[in-house]
Amino acid sequence: MIITLEAWEYEHAYQVGIRRFTENWTKKDAAYYDKSKMEEDRNAQPAAAICELAVAKYTNQYWSGHVWNKQDHAIHKGKPDVGTNIEVRRVRTQSGPAVRDKDLNRNLIIWGARLVDSEYKTVELLGWIEADKGFEVGEYRKGYKIIPADKLNKDWL
């Protein structure tokens, strides 16, 4: 499923991503991140926000476009990206979205999304899966599992 953002959607999501980036300039990356595979955060944060908005648009669910300072992370860390229980995971180099231990037993739905173009205007939705089921079928990596895209539900097929 391909989602193309309207100009105002793109601008809003990109602004949210840049705000997330600047709010966390001095925050250290999670231990499980492989620095050699990471893209610059000034690009990764807007890309992730754009993927979240694309999922919200497709599912017709609320997207808060939340931004908070690193000091407030503990207060907000359990809030979903979209609706009441959707976590959006951008897929860049892996075969599908990530699922982590912290996602389990929370009734979460994991959506995988990938940017299609270099301008970040178009998003491919890879599908969704319940986090607990995704953890069962996921392939282990250091600190998380990857859910192969072919294991995701695709309602549009």
Image (cartoon, rainbow, N blue to C red):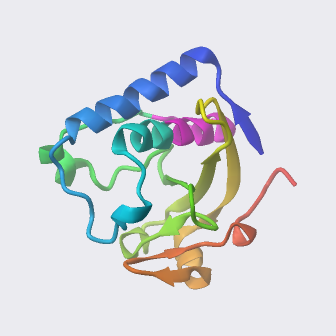
The x and y percentages for residue 106 are: 42, 67
Quarter of the picture containing the C terminus is bottom right
Residue drawn at 60 percent across, 72 percent down: 147
Q: Main secondary structure of the magenta part?
A: helix
On the picture, is 7 further left or further right than 86?
right
- Judge by depth and name the residue closer to the eye, 142 or 74: 142
- Judge by depth and name the residue closer to the eye, 126 or 142: 142
On the picture, is 147 further left or further right than 44?
right
Residue 150 sits in quarter: bottom right
Residue drawn at 57 percent across, 84 percent down: 136
Residue drawn at 71 percent across, 35 percent down: 3
The x and y percentages for residue 116 are: 68, 41
Q: Residue furthest right?
A: 157
**Where 49 falls versus 38 (above or below)?**
above
- Judge by depth and name the residue closer to the eye, 22 or 5: 22
Residue drawn at 61 percent across, 35 percent down: 118
Residue 135 magenta-highlighted: no
Residue 58 magenta-highlighted: yes
User: Which range is magenta?
Assistant: 50-63
The x and y percentages for residue 75 are: 19, 50
**Where 75 falls versus 37 (above or below)?**
above
On the picture, is 71 further left or further right than 1?
left
The answer to whether residue 63 is visible is yes
The x and y percentages for residue 2 are: 75, 40
Quarter of the picture containing the N terminus is top right
